[in-house]
Structures are given as C-alpha cells and as structure tokens.
Image (tube, rainbow, N blue to C red):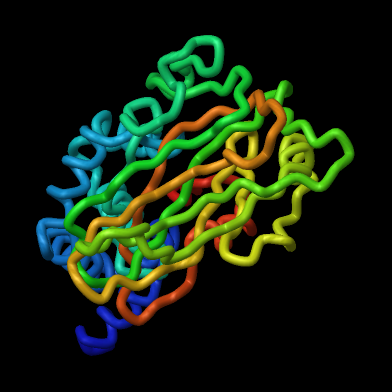
Amino acid sequence: MLPNDIHFEIIHRIRSTKDLLALMRTSKAFHSLTVAYIEHYCATDNRLEKVGIFMQMKPLLIQELALKQKMLKNPGQTTLLQFKAVRWFQGDDPTGEIIDRVLVAQIQSFAHKDNSNYFQVIHDETLNRQIVHLHTVCWLHFEHTFRDLPPGRYQCSLRMRATPQLNWSTFGASQPPGSIEVRQITQTHGSPEVLVSQAMQANWWSQIRARQFDGSNLENATLHFESGTSWFHVTLTPFQLERCSDILFQFRDVDHPFWKSGLDWDFIELRKLSKFRNQSFYPKLQRKPLAFVDKTE
C-alpha cells in the first residue's frame, strides 16, 4: 500500500472532479483519503463558505448556475460538487480566485446610460438579470472602481455580447481606437497610472460579430468566444499591485466620431492570481467548448 503522503500528492495533482471520482473507485484507501482531502481543502480559509456567499450574491454563468442547482438538489452527495465549486471560484491554480463580479447595469459612472435613445438596461431571460444594450451612441465611456485591493497579482475581464446589429461605423477610414484598461488610483493629483491597456480598433467589431476575430492583433489581452452563445470575454493581461490600492476599470471609445450600436455588456470580473503563476484564465478556455466545463457528467 502507498503511504498517505503519496496518496495525497496524487490527489493534489488531479485537476478534474471526473478523474477524482475515478480515483475514488480504485480502492477504499483512495476513497477515504480523497474524501478527507476534499473536506480539508474546502474547509481551509473558509473556502466553501466564501463560495456559498459568492454564488448567492454575484452574477453567475449558465454553467455555474447548473452547478449550483446540482448542489441544491443533491444535498447528501455534494462532496465532489463542492470541491469543483471551490476550485472554480476560490482555486489556487492558474485561474486564480474570483474576487468580484460587477454588473455593468449597476455601474454608476456610465455616460448617457439613463438616456433610452442611446442605451437600454434590459432583463435577460436566460441569465435572469439585467444587462446593458447599446442602441446607438457616439461617446461611449463607463468605468468602475474596485477599492482597497491588497498587494498581489490581478486580472480583469469584461463579458460582452455581439448582437446581429453590432456596428462600429468606419466609413472606410482609419479611426481612433477605443480601449479597455485598468488604472491604479494614486493619492496625488493627476490621472491614475495605467496598469494595463488594450486598444480596440473600430474594424475589429465586425470581425467579432462574425466570430472571425482570432485575437492575433491583441497585445495586452485575449478574447474568448463562448460556445453556443453570442457572448465573449476580453481578458486583460495580469497586473501587479505593490501596495493596497484602488483600481479603475474603464471601457472607452470617445475619439471615434461615428455611431456605434449593437453591443451588450454583462459583467466585469476581477481575479486574484496565484503568487507564482502568471497564466491567464480565458486563453485556457479557448481550447474548451464552454466558459465553464462540467466534467462530472
């Protein structure tokens, strides 16, 4: 029989709950030790409690909602489901820990959002929450401040949807790009320091609508299309905070002089990455069919 420490090392290296379930079926020893490992992992740092609060309070993806429903329907058989949820939301692997998700519909600093000629805040039946729909506008700018972040390595992403009406008029000319960026707010006067910024060229949006944008022109971000939906994620490269700080997430397209239309926004996500990792989350998902893959089926 293998020593317990080797058992735990094997368990620790397994990344999917499907493989863990298979391992548990190999022997009574692996079954009992795997259960012990999962219980310890979920209890450490109140991981399971934090995940429960997050799943109650924050916007979820469709696949995350399905996981939540499975956990509620099978209260006596949730060990692996809890483990999956903890790893997804509070994991110490390259995906990092989800610190916050903020609905764009609830952002206060959003130019012209209250003007229904430009934007509509609508209820999405599938998501069961409000999203912001861009009807038509020239000046496009919204921002959100994440406050009191401790030192560490972070990553921001924005979930958007391309509707059939998505259009960024170019009229054949080269237009100033928009940008998605994160800035660090300083105590001194002046503009916040740019931590990471990705230019968004006007002619990219038609490619995104057609799902023909391969992301090769992105220098400081990745773009991931969800399978089976029109939603996509733009994930900025990680950035480092050396001290406790407020950061400002911005979506700006104010220099492009023509009308823009047909884009929806869901939420901004902030993750804290493992200290020794610098891999981004959504590039991994580009090789998978969904933004959240259920491996317990």
Q: Toward the viewer: 148 or 187?
A: 187
- Identify the residue shown where x is 21% and y is 33%: 56
Q: Toward the viewer: 256 or 296?
A: 256
Relative image position of residue 125 (x, y in whole percent): 46, 15
In this image, 160 relative to 136: left or right?
left
Relative image position of residue 260 (x, y in whole percent): 67, 28
Q: In this view, does 235 lie above or below 290?
A: below
Q: Which quadrant of the figure has residue 203? A: top right
- Identify the residue shown where x is 61% and y is 46%: 178
Q: Is residue 176 above or below residue 263?
A: below
Q: Is residue 293 above or below residue 20?
A: above
Q: Which residue sits furthest right?
A: 172
- Identify the residue shown where x is 18% and y is 39%: 76
Relative image position of residue 182 (x, y in whole percent): 42, 57
In this image, 200 relative to 53: left or right?
right
- Identify the residue shown where x is 40% and y is 43%: 268
Q: Which residue sits furthest front?
A: 189
Q: Which quadrant of the figure has residue 4? A: bottom left
Q: Toward the viewer: 79 or 179?
A: 179
The N terminus, quarter of image? bottom left
**Residue 32, visible in the rendered structure:** no
Relative image position of residue 79 (x, y in whole percent): 23, 51
**Residue 90, visible in the rendered structure:** yes
Q: Which residue sits furthest top?
A: 116
Q: In this view, does 25 lie above or below 253?
A: below
User: In this figure, what is the number of numbered marks?
Assistant: 0
